[in-house]
Image (cartoon, rainbow, N blue to C red):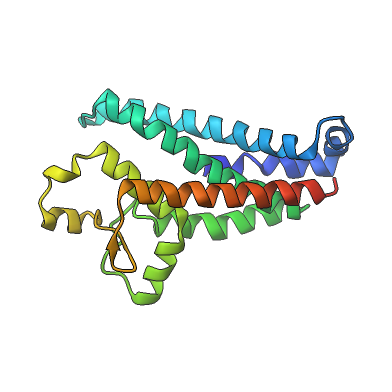
Amino acid sequence: MTSIFLHYPLLKNKNFGYMKEILVSPISRVSIAVGKVLSASTIATFQGIMLFLLIPFLGINYSLTSLLLVVPFMFLLACALSSFGLLIASFLRSTQGFQLIVQILVMPMIFLSGALFPINNMPGWMDVVVKLNPVTYGVDVMKKIMIDVESLSPMIRDAMGLNLQLFGTTLTVAMEIAFIFTFTVILILFATLSFRRANA
């Protein structure tokens, strides 16, 4: 949510004319767009790390190795969502419209990602939405990195929704990372292209 909402000030900058000063600078619009994506992703990742540091106070233990492994993927997922936020912001001029669209899109993405409850045993149409949701794969990878999945019984894995399948194939961490990476690259391309053509 942070990586998307951090593009909200872009619309204020448009309305107050500050974006015109940025866009007429010698820096290319693509560089500006990529810089905004990386900036929002870095802030969102650091916020995620701060939440991880609070986990031991809840009586839950995790290894430092797991945290170091999950951070790069948190950044990758943040880049994907940050690009999504920039793509939306580049098309709009109204801050109210940005908030409305983001709320309509982001809340379902969170609730249908497996972050709050398991995503198994859903209706067929909803299962399709879950599989199209990039956050689903991000949450699943984080669970598999932070939890020793191999030590769990098949019943517990199924109850926790850790048997994510696509076209009848159980997805591995590598496959999910490849999906998120592809999704991120596509979104960054669309976001930078849209930002390049946008008018302040």
The correct choice, above or below, for 167 with respect to 147 in the image is: below
Res. 27 visible in picture = yes
Q: Nearer the viewer, residue 165 or 44?
A: 165
Q: Nearer the viewer, residue 117 or 20?
A: 20
Residue placed at 81% from the left, 50% from the top? 198
Where residue 159 sits in the image (x, y, percent)?
18, 58
The correct choice, above or below, for 147 with respect to 140 in the image is: above
Where residue 140 sits in the image (x, y, percent)?
33, 49
Q: Is residue 88 left or right of residue 51?
A: right
Q: How many marks?
A: 0
Residue 36 image-quadrant placement: top right
Where residue 40 sits in the image (x, y, percent)?
59, 35
Q: Nearer the viewer, residue 11 or 147?
A: 147
Q: Is residue 38 left or right of residue 128?
A: right
Residue placed at 67% from the left, 37% from the top? 34
The correct choice, above or below, for 59 with respect to 10 in the image is: above
Q: Is residue 110 left or right of residue 96?
A: left
Residue placed at 41% from the left, 70% from the top? 128
Residue 38 image-quadrant placement: top right
Residue 68 image-quadrant placement: top left
Where residue 53 sits in the image (x, y, percent)?
34, 25
